[in-house]
Image (tube, grey):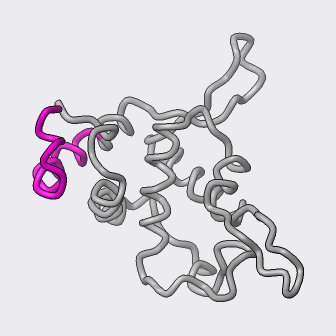
Amino acid sequence: MTTYHDVPADLLIGELSARLAEMEAISPPEWSSIVKTGTHRERPPSQDNWWFIRSAAILRKVGKLGPIGANHMAQHFGGPKDRGVKPNRAVAGSRNISRTIMQQLFNAGLIESKMNAAGNVNHGKVLTPAGQSLLDSVAHEVRDQAVERHPGLSNY
């Protein structure tokens, strides 16, 4: 069976965002239409479905990099901040967006908290079996498109 590790991210995220848009637990807040995605951005996103695309990207990253927290996740969505005549510096993306999306994915049952053996320290979020199944089923659906684009993937 094809897993989400076997297909390109752009194909996976495109189809996964459509699946997440159908879920009731994943919905953009009212402030999502006017918010910037980080201090390195000058304008809000121009896509109407950017919340679902970011949710799909975060779900994929939790699967690949988990256990991971909202702070580390925001760093993955950062970029260079234009500081005028001074050299650019790397800044993190919006932690509120990352945290809110991770809370929605948690409430949807796609990710869960990873605790230590004593059960008192949260090490970050990891995929649940439902989240793993969703990612793998979407990867299986887009596998044919991936093989058309990259014929070498047919070996996997």
Q: Nearer the viewer, residue 2 or 113?
A: 2
Task: Residue lying at the far top in this picture: please name it.
Answer: 117
Residue 120 spot, x, y in % from top left = 77, 21
Residue pictured at 16% horizontal, 47% vertical? 143
Residue 32 spot, x, y in % from top left = 58, 78
Compared across the picture, whether 45 is left or right of 117 comes to left
Residue 142 spot, x, y in % from top left = 18, 52
* Dominant SS type (magenta): helix
Residue pictured at 73% horizontal, 61% vertical? 92
Compared across the picture, whether 118 is left or right of 100 comes to right
Q: Nearer the viewer, residue 41 or 106?
A: 41
Q: Nearer the viewer, residue 141 or 101?
A: 141
Residue pictured at 24% horizontal, 45% vertical? 139
Q: Which residues are magenta?
A: 136-156
User: In the image, is residue 49 part of the stretch drawn in magenta?
Assistant: no
Residue 135 spot, x, y in % from top left = 32, 43
Image height of 98 relative to 46, above or below: above
Image height of 129 relative to 49, above or below: above
Q: Quadrant of residue 137?
A: top left
Compared across the picture, whether 22 is left or right of 127 comes to left
Quadrant of image for the N terminus:
top left
Image height of 2 relative to 75, above or below: above
Q: Count of labels shown?
A: 0
Q: Quadrant of residue 56?
A: bottom left
Compared across the picture, whether 133 is left or right of 121 comes to left
Q: Nearer the viewer, residue 120 or 10?
A: 10
Residue pictured at 12% horizontal, 48% vertical? 151
Quadrant of image for the C terminus:
top left
User: In the image, is residue 138 part of the stretch drawn in magenta?
Assistant: yes
